[in-house]
Image: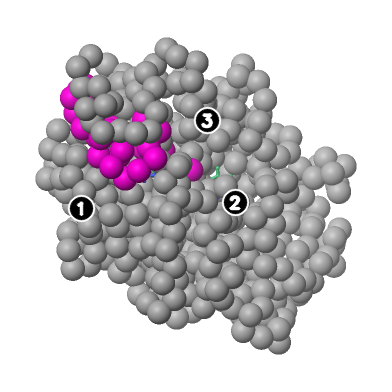
Amino acid sequence: MSDLLPSTTGIVGRVLRRGTEAYESLRRAAVWHAGVPHRFPEIIVLAVTEQDVVGAVRLARAEGLQVAIRSGGHSWSGSHLRDGSLLIDMSNLRDIVIDRASMTVTVQPGLRGSELLGMLRKQGLFFPVGHNYAVGIGGYLLQGGFGWAGREFGPACMSVVAIDAVTADGERVHASDDENADLLWAARGAGPGFFAAVTRFTLRVYPHRAVTLSSTYIFPASCAADVFRFVNERGRTTPLELGVVVQRHEIAGGEPVVILHGLAFTETEESARAQLSLLEECPALGHAILSRACEPTVHGAVELDESTAVPNESRRWIADNIVSDAGADDLLPNLHTLIETLPPAPTYLLMFNWDGYPGSPVRPPMAFSLEGAFCYALYTAWDEASDDDRYRGWTTGIMRNWEPYASYTMLADENLLNRPTAFMTAESLERLDRLRSAWDVEGRFVSWLGRPDGERERASERAQG
Ligand SMILES: Cc1cc2nc3c(=O)[nH]c(=O)nc-3n(C[C@H](O)[C@H](O)[C@H](O)COP(=O)(O)OP(=O)(O)OC[C@H]3O[C@@H](n4cnc5c(N)ncnc54)[C@H](O)[C@@H]3O)c2cc1C
């Protein structure tokens, strides 16, 4: 242990070393669900100022530790819990400045997306934040970010116009398209593989649309093929956000059901209704157990309310996903396997249309570099640690069956530890590696838990060796 004390690093937040009770409760709180990984940082720094982040990086250097970062703590895999690291907890960095004149907002990483959206809405503004009320801005923006109206605005990282960050040398830098542009390029999609600590994001914001209508239909599992094929074919070019959820449901006595959901985000009720009329063309419509057409809603409204937010944080969870252009014929066999072996609720499969919005905006230069029409994400929950292997194995196995049809995996719901797979183009990965070598010569910042090229990143190798 070095003699560099928190007082000499200038850190005013708490500095907790492994072995204390306070350390363990902060370590557990760093992952939002009950399946907290058995990975133990040596030190946790609870930053309260940007200067604390500088101090924490310098402390890590002095102690020969790698650095991992937590903002909202909503990484499903708990990517930031690493053996032999110093964890910087950024959840208390929560400043926000809205600049209506320039249609930008500068926000710190500890703020939740729902909080940001709530503040923007009061000013008639909008940002495509994530769907769950508690997802932190920090990890969400870095990994790409699929959010409300994301189909129209693209991955949220497209709307990041600048960042302020602390580098591996403990220096504060600003990155925009005109200054340290390569760092901004990396921040737009590197996710848990980013090699600096972001303390502020500057985001482009948008006018809030007047009308949001949603339609929901629930079908028995026997309609799965019809609903799935309908969405897979018609969901590619519609401006509607279309979602299909497969889960066991009390409405069907605990048997699996298929929920079809459409969301229109428009200026007039007439155009929202016109968009949603597409759902009435679903060939399974006559078999719906429940139909709710064109209900007014507000983006993020449910998720702003903690009491109604799902999923349940007291459970153990794993997530995995593929993004794919494949047609229904290729994907349906595994969908049937999934339905036949589906664990109890709240485990669910979510399919939603993603790329392909008519007239979608041109992507800026960014590490987030792969495209695909639909995301298929599987979220599995259970209670007992003794069932970890069973449910992790089931989830990984189902997604592996779809691997031949996958374009990439979203880092949002990554399962790289169990299923390393492509999350950006090989060229982007190579460029990111080169930038990492330049910005973080000693490999100070930990990287992804697994890599698509099969090469486990340096941090994991060291931690496991
Ligand atoms: C219930 C739930 C719902 C979700 N819904 C959505 C959704 O609708 N859309 C979507 O896109 N994703 C969704 N996700 C995934 C989520 O957005 C990502 O896991 C995201 O990384 C979470 O951000 P965070 O700040 O809360 O996470 P954290 O766990 O704090 O961060 C994730 C990783 O990002 C890196 N990181 C975080 N902050 C910083 C920083 N300031 N500087 C450098 N690196 C940093 C770290 O490597 C960290 O391990 C959901 C997750 C959950 C659990």
Q: Is residue 280 above or below residue 37?
A: below
For marks 3 and 1 on the same chain, the one whose residue lies earlier in the sequence: 3
Give the residue drawn at x 44%, y 68%: 98
| Secondary structure state at the residue bearing disc 2 | loop
For marks 1 and 2 on the same chain, the one whose residue lies earlier in the sequence: 2
In the rendered image, residue 6, in percent from the top left (x then y), is placed at: 28, 26
Is label 3 or label 2 in front? 3
Give the residue drawn at x 65%, y 20%: 384
Q: Which residues are magenta?
A: 45-72
In the rendered image, residue 198, in percent from the top left (x then y), is placed at: 32, 49
Please state, as top left, top right, bottom left or bottom right, where the N terminus lies in the image: top left
Give the residue drawn at x 67%, y 74%: 212
Mark 2: C-beta under 8 Å from nearest atom of ligand 1: yes
Cα separation between marks 3 and 2 = 17 Å
Mark 3: C-beta under 8 Å from nearest atom of ligand 1: no
Please state, as top left, top right, bottom left or bottom right, where the C terminus lies in the image: top left
Question: What's under tag 1, amino acid-wise?
Answer: Val
Q: In this image, 49 relative to 412: left or right?
A: left
Q: Label 1, on which residue?
A: 173
Tell me the crowding category of disc 1: few under 14, some 14 to 19, or many 20 or more residues within 10 angstroms, Cα based.
Answer: some
Q: Label 3, on which residue?
A: 29
Q: Is residue 454 visible?
A: no
Question: In the rendered picture of this protein, how many numbered marks are placed on residues?
Answer: 3
Q: Is residue 221 above or below residue 266?
A: above
Labels 3 & 2 near each other (Cβ < 8 A): no
Q: Is residue 397 above or below residue 423?
A: above
Labels 1 & 2 near each other (Cβ < 8 A): no
Cα separation between marks 1 and 2 = 31 Å
Question: What's under tag 3, amino acid-wise?
Answer: Ala
